[in-house]
Amino acid sequence: MSENLPLVVLLYYKYVQIDKPETFVKDHRALCESLGLKGRILVAEEGINGTVAGDKETTDRYQEVLHADPRFADMEFKISHGDPTTFPKLMIKARQEIVTLGLENDVDPNQTTGTHLSPREWKEMLDKEKDDVVVFDARNRYESDVGFFENAIKPDIEHFRDLPDIVDQYSHLKDKKFLMYCTGGIRCEKASALFKERGFKDVYQLHGGIVSYLEHEGRDHWEGDCFVFDQRMVVPDEFALAKEPIGRCEHTGAPTRNFENCLHVPCHRLFIVSAEALEEHPEYGICSRCTESGITLNSVDRGGNVPSENAS
Ligand SMILES: [Zn+2]
C-alpha cells in the first residue's frame, strides 16, 4: 500500500505558549512554501496543530527545523502516507484554540490533564483489565462510525465543542478507570482535563492516539478504520483495507468507506454513503436525517465535500 503512496504525511501538535500567533503564521507560511509542503496547520497562543504532506526529504527537513526551535524540541511526529491529492493546498491559520472546545474558562492541558499511557501500556491495560475499565472515544460520531476500540463508549456528537454538554451523561462512571482516546492525542489533552474538572477521578489518555497505537501495537483491541481529516478520509492501512469496512451506508446499509457531506447546506453533516448507491440515486447525497425531515434534492443548494474541521 505505502509504495503506491509516495508522500509522507506528518501529524503533530504541541501545547506550548506561542506569542503573536499572526506573526508566527506569516513566518511559518514562508517556511512551508520554501520547502514545498502542503497541508493544514492551526496556530494559537496555546500551541500548534498540523498535518502536512511532502516527499521524504522535505518532511525530514521540516522536522529538523521545528526540532531546532526550543518550543518544539520534543515535538512528536506521527507518520503515515499519502499522495498529492491528500492535501492539494497549504492552509495555515491563527485561531483562538488549536482544537475548539469553546469553554469560557478554557481548560489548560499544561496544568491539568489525564495520565498518559503509551500504546504499549494502553494495550496491556486492555489485555488485563478490559472488563473493569471504561473506554471512551473522544472523537465525533462520524469518526467512530468507521472504527473504534472494542467496547468503547462512542458519543453522538458532530463537533468536539459539543463534548462539554454531554460529559454529565457519564457521571455514573466517575469512580471507574476512565480511558480515553482520539486520533493523534491532541483532543484528549483537553477532554481529559474537562472530565477531571467534572469530577472523574481516574482519567487516562492514549499518548499519540490511534495513529501511534496502530503503528506500534498493531490491531489488537481495535476494529475498523482510523478516520482522518483530509482527502484520504481514513488512514490507508493495508491491514484495515483488506477487511470489510465497519462503516455502513446510511441509506442502503451496505458496507463502505465512502463519506460525503450532506448536500443540504445548513446541515452539511458528514455521513457514510455507498458511492455506487449514490451514483444510481443522487438523492442519497442528502443525509438520512434530512431525508426523514422531508428535504429533497430539489430543495437544496449543492455544497462541497471537503471536511471542514482540523482536529487530530
Ligand atoms: Zn443532512
Image (spheres, rainbow, N blue to C red):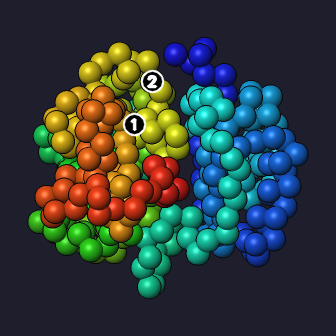
In which image quadrant can residue 25 be found? bottom right
Answer with left or right where residue 149 lies relative to residue 293: right
The three-letter amino acid code for the residue at tag 1 is Cys
In the image shown, does 310 or 110 lie closer to the viewer?
A: 310
Residue nearer the viewer, 1 or 174: 1
In the displayed structure image, the side of residue 18 where residue 212 appears, left or right: left
Q: Is mark 2 within 8 Å of ligand 1?
A: no
Q: Residue 226: which disc? A: 1
Q: Earlier in the sequence, mark 2 or mark 1?
A: 1
Give coordinates of residue 213: x percent, y percent. 43, 34
| Residue at the image point whose x is 61% and y is 46% from the top | 51
Q: Amino acid at mark 2?
A: Asp
Q: Secondary structure at mark 2?
A: loop
Q: Is residue 171 above or below residue 268?
A: below
> Is residue 167 at least partly visible in the picture?
yes
Say which residue appears at 67% left-offset and 69% top-offset: 94
Give yes or no for contact between labels 2 and 1 (Cβ–Cβ under 8 Å).
yes
Residue 86 to residue 50: above or below: above
| Residue that mark 2 sits on | 237
In the rendering, at what x and y percent does residue 106 appear? Answer: 47, 78
**Residue in view at x 71 percent, y 50 percent:** 90
Residue placed most toward the observer, 59 or 170: 59
Between residue 37 and residue 203, name the one nearer to us: 37
Q: CA distance from mark 2 to mark 1?
A: 9 Å
Task: Sort mark 2 into few (<14), some (14-19) or many (20+) by Cα contacts within 10 Å.
Answer: some
